[in-house]
Amino acid sequence: MGILADAALAAGGEVIGIIPRRMIARELGHAGVTSLIPVGSMHQRKQKMADLADAFLALPGGIGTMEELFEAFTWLQLGLHHKPVGLLNVAGFYDRLIEFLAHMQEQRFLKPQHFESLLVDDDVERLLDRFARFNHQPVGKWMDRKPKARKP
């Protein structure tokens, strides 16, 4: 994340860092960001990032990247936001993940419209263009179910 922040800053971009106070105390914060917002927990960090974000884009990364990606993807699926969520599939990094998501769809654990709402490309310009054109039709996971009649 530091390299990405440095590149954005060098290009004249704005970088907002959101970090739990505990990590600041361990000197893990990036001192050069435009704005550094301390929060109480990782949960608060993710919520603040989601509130400020226009979109969610995962670059190749580790388990923390996966956790944040799937939370944003789940929130989209549930209709809690309508922002684009995507993967930049550099050098096929996410190929197996995409295969697994297709398997989940085949096994009926992921609806086709939800699978298709995850934007994936190996070209950043094309992916950003798809993000700009993203017009999510709210189809929450359970929105197509009719409520069951309650017994008196």
Image (cartoon, grey):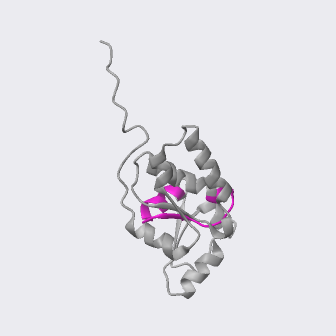
Magenta span contains residue 144: no
Q: Nearer the viewer, residue 42 or 93?
A: 93
Residue 64's place in the image compared with 25, above or below, is: above
Image coordinates of residue 96 in percent, x first then y, are 68, 55
Residue at image position (53%, 57%) is: 46
Q: Nearer the viewer, residue 79 or 9?
A: 79
Residue 61's place in the image compared with 139, above or below, is: below
Magenta span contains residue 56: yes
Q: Residue furthest top?
A: 152
Residue at image position (50%, 54%) is: 72
Residue 121's place in the image compared with 148, above or below, is: below
Residue at image position (61%, 54%) is: 98
Image coordinates of residue 108 in percent, x first then y, are 54, 37
Residue 58's place in the image compared with 42, above or below, is: below
Q: Quadrant of the N terminus?
A: bottom right
Q: Is residue 5 left or right of residue 134?
A: right
Image coordinates of residue 126 in percent, x first then y, are 49, 73
Image coordinates of residue 67 in percent, x first then y, are 61, 53
Residue 140, located in which quarter of the rendered image? top left
Q: Is residue 100 visible?
A: yes
Residue 28, located in which quarter of the rendered image? bottom right
Q: Nearer the viewer, residue 125 or 12?
A: 125
Residue 53, located in which quarter of the rendered image? bottom left
Residue at image position (45%, 64%) is: 55
Q: Quadrant of the C terminus?
A: top left
Q: Is residue 133 left or right of residue 44?
A: left
Q: Residue furthest front?
A: 106
* Magenta-highlighted residues: 46-65
Q: Is residue 28 left or right of residue 77?
A: right
